[in-house]
Amino acid sequence: MQFKTRTHNCGELREQNIGERVVLNGWVSTVRDLGGVMFLEVRDRYGITQAVFEPHIDANALHLAKHARSEFVVSIEGVVRKRPEGMDNPELETGFIDVLADTIVILNQAKTPPFPIKDEIDAHEDLRLKYRYLDLRRPEMQENLFLRHKMYLLVRQYLDQYGFTEVETPVLMKSTPEGARDFLVPSRLHKGRFYALPQSPQTYKQLLMVAGLDRYFQIVKCFRDEDLRADRQPEFTQIDIEMSFVDRDDVLNVMEGLIHKIYKDIKGIDIHLPLKRLSYEEAMERYGSDKPDLRFDLEMTTLNDLFRDSEFRVFKDTLDKKGIITGLLAPGCGEYTRNQLDVLTDFAKKLGAGGLIWIRVKQEGLDSPTMKFFTDNEKTGMIEKLGAKPGDLILILVGPKTKTLNQMGSLRLEMARRLELIKPDAEPKLLWVLDFPLFEWDEETKRYYAMHHPFTSPRIEDVQYMESDPGRVYARAYDLVLNGNEIAGGSIRIHNKELQQQMFNALGLTPEEAQVKFGFLMNAFEYGAPPHGGIAFGFDRLAMLLAGKSSIREVIAFPKTASGMSLMDESPSEVDEHQLKELHIKIR
């Protein structure tokens, strides 16, 4: 029997539709056979409606309905009625009506699915990814995709309003290996040559500024061949943005408006503007992270000044080597047992710390094996600086500055978890982190790398140190942080050839190497490049946080596993020998 076009979707019918003849199409969600009466709940992306089959209405329809099973695709026709008294289901928006059906067409049968098609299932993620087309039938997963859809619309509407033009940039581009590894694509027509998939459209968007586009954006796929985590994928989506004739505050102000609109329209939350701003140095010293979580207090305190005259060998050696002594107050933890403190010490050691100094704050004074190394003034100063009171616990780490601050930042998060300070429904905390170092030193390769990317402009006042003291140079860079997650990063760019070559020199690239890798950009700078800057939002990560998830795989339709596999279509896979021959490639 041919099915009829639906008159309503499965989430649409209400009491005002009582008496209407309707056609519903969808999947069978649940079946209840009470012998003489059948109940089928029919589901589509809009909701669920209950259909009822009774012998006195249509015995043949009842007979056919008895063949229906979970996930069968059906078309049902009947009349909307009010549910009998006592049978309402207020948990469903359609729960005060049902459809008294006289026709059912089974459009397609279905095998028993490997997991229930409902929310809050206890199925291994690998199984869900293998049968992703079934996983995506679940309302929770569909809501995540609807959220992404709404984000796409909001971003485009907002940026269009502010004069931005959406421009597509190439997916096949020149390989410029700086940072993560490129995905390479062999050329059939040009033997031995390769394209790369873009890690970002960075050079293209700068060229669009040279071209006079003034304001560009793109919601774009990017590719990085790197080790994966819960919030990383080999292919990911970002909101890519660039603006001409701007300084840092111009970019930040427009982006604050964008994040305000996203939160207002999607979550109904008014983000207070302007957002908090911290320098990289402040963020590291107060929170031990360049992406600090501000949903709880627990600020770290630098104690170098307090112990500058200390005779404690550990402190003295650290200060002589220009290291740091950083302290954290754990309120109400002063009664921790020795076993609990040993667990914390092991936690710090696993982070790479040499050890953890702990001090219980008691009514009668400070209690710790290290107390014999501190003067009375140092003990008093420590209590004052940290705001400690009886019943609290003081934790101290010492060592090289950046490494030790990162360790204490991790310990800060661990204490927040132990004290249950991070509430799921807490107000979102956004901030800008500014003034990053332009370079970071890699001890293994004994060279500097760009902390962001090699097109980031140094602060004008620091240009004089580019060659003589690169570690002293700060960048005109900025990151947007949400609840301890970096959701966007950008910078004012270098826009003249001479400064760009200075940057390449500091990174160990000769003029010849720079010309081979980035000659097209350097040449463009010779034709009047405007001052420009931009930013890129991690679209998947932002969607994950808005959806309240802990993995970006939950908000991507067809993601890869943590090892980069697609279990559903079994990629990456081997290819035909003929294909390899055409590409001039031989597998060894």
Image (spheres, rainbow, N blue to C red):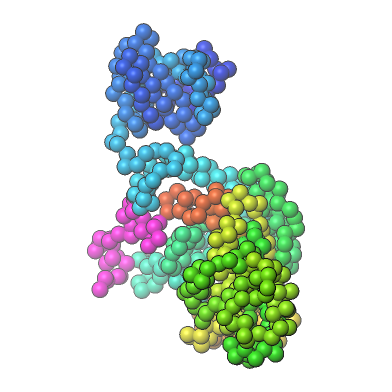
Instruction: State the image coordinates of residue 403 (x, y, percent, origin top left).
Output: 56, 78
Q: Is residue 106 left or right of residue 13?
A: left
Q: Nearer the viewer, residue 536 or 334?
A: 334
Most frequent secondary structure within the magenta stretch: loop
Apparent side of residue 47 relative to residue 245 in the rendered image (left or right): left
The segment highlighted magenta reads: 560-588
Q: Is residue 484 magenta?
A: no
In the rendered image, the vertical position of residue 433 relative to residue 522, given as above or below: above
Q: Residue furthest top?
A: 56
User: Which sits in the foreground, 294 or 453?
Assistant: 294
Quarter of the image containing the N terminus? top left
The structure residue drawn at horizontal position 74% and vertical position 53%, both measured from the top left corner, is: 272
Expressed as whole percent of the image width and height from the top left, the position of residue 562 reads 40, 60
In the rendered image, which quarter is residue 531 located in? bottom right
Q: Residue at x 61, y 72 (%)?
A: 360
Q: Percent x, y for residue 6?
A: 46, 24
Residue 6 showing in the rendered view: yes
Residue located 62% across and 89% down the image? 312
318 to 79, vertically: above or below? below
Q: Nearer the viewer, residue 77 or 500?
A: 77
Looking at the image, residue 412 sits to the left or right of residue 129; the answer is: right
Vertical side of 371 occupied by 272: above or below: above
* Total numbered labels: 0
Of residues 456 and 315, the one nearer the viewer is 315
